[in-house]
Amino acid sequence: MQSKTRSSKGLWIGLGVVIVAIIAVMFLHNTGQSSESSSKVETIKVGSGNDGQPFAYLDKDGKPAGMDIALLQAIDKKLPQYKFKLTLSDFPTMITNLKSGKTTIAMYQIEQNAERKENFKFGTVGYTVWDTLLATKKSTGVLDSFADAKGKKLYVTNSTNQATLTDAYLKKNANAYSVVRGTYAMEQVAQGLNSEQFNVYPAPKYSIDLLNRQFKTNLVYGKSVNHSNAYPMFNKKADPKFVKAVNKAMAEMKEDGTLKKLSNQWLKGDYVPKD
């Protein structure tokens, strides 16, 4: 009887060990699944430019380059829960892609205006100053307002905030000036000003500095006609969690000097907003 009892006892102990082992394996398996699920990376489709040096363009090897591209890469690095997939295009196509949902976020020196605020979400941290100035050759004279441009010919890039501002003034003041529209590279803008194809270029200080530095245009300007900064812009239906994560990453990079470093690297000066 005693031997039988010891044998039964041993059997129960053995079964207990097996059951504990099975529970442990199941626990580890479930924990592994949970860990794998929580660490899943979400792909985010991102829009930017393909021919806008030094902001977003394709380099000689066909690889994306520029300040906005470098900034997107820096944000992507700070957000391991997301993986950015780039779609590069001209500015109007980038806007269309974002509105239709083909992309979730776009960065290509995008400014806020009433129409865009209605159709998109904006980030909370600006990264480039885009106050609009009216650049002219010295012979044209210094302009402080659109009213000062009466009778002159302006060049604006399609779908930009400068085009919106120019058209808004024309709407209230018909035939105040004429407008040349296009998607000119900076060299073409310089040629247009030098050949007097147009004599006023609404643009931020950065663009005027670049024209003067690279193409010796000797442009002058007066007071700002509009205060603005460039911001990340999101599809209206973008996940608020993602928008919040990007805003946080941008705020950290402004605080730690990353935005200033990228501005100096790509724009040859500190054009980061102080506000």
Image (spheres, helix red, strand yellow):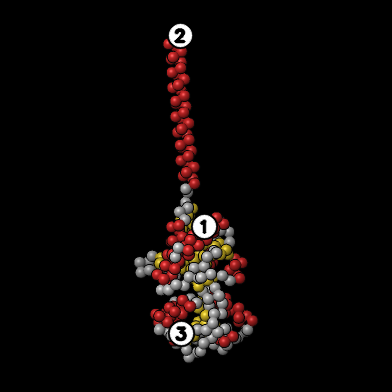
Mark 3 or mark 1, which has the lower sequence index?
3
Q: Local crowd at mark 1 within 10 Å, few (<14), some, or many (≥20)?
A: some
Residue 256: image location, x then y, percent:
45, 63
Amino acid found under the numbered disc labelled 1: Ala
Q: Which mark is residue 219?
A: 3
Label 3–label 1 contact, CB within 8 A:
no
Q: Which mark is residue 245?
A: 1
Q: Quadrant of the N terminus?
A: top left
Helix, strand or loop status at disc 3: strand
Query: Closer to the camera, 54 or 47?
Result: 54
Tell me the residue that label 2 is attached to. Answer: 1
Helix, strand or loop status at disc 2: loop
Give the residue displayed 48% in from the left and 38% down from the top. 30
Mark 2 or mark 3, which has the lower sequence index?
2
Q: Local crowd at mark 2 within 10 Å, few (<14), some, or many (≥20)?
A: few
Amino acid found under the numbered disc labelled 2: Met
Residue 44: image location, x then y, percent:
49, 57
The residue positioned farthest toward the right in the image shown: 172
Q: Nearer the viewer, mark 2 or mark 3?
A: 2
Residue 193: image location, x then y, percent:
46, 85
Q: Distance between the Cα atoms at labels 3 and 1? A: 40 Å
Q: Distance between the Cα atoms at labels 2 and 1? A: 71 Å
Q: Distance between the Cα atoms at labels 2 and 3? A: 109 Å
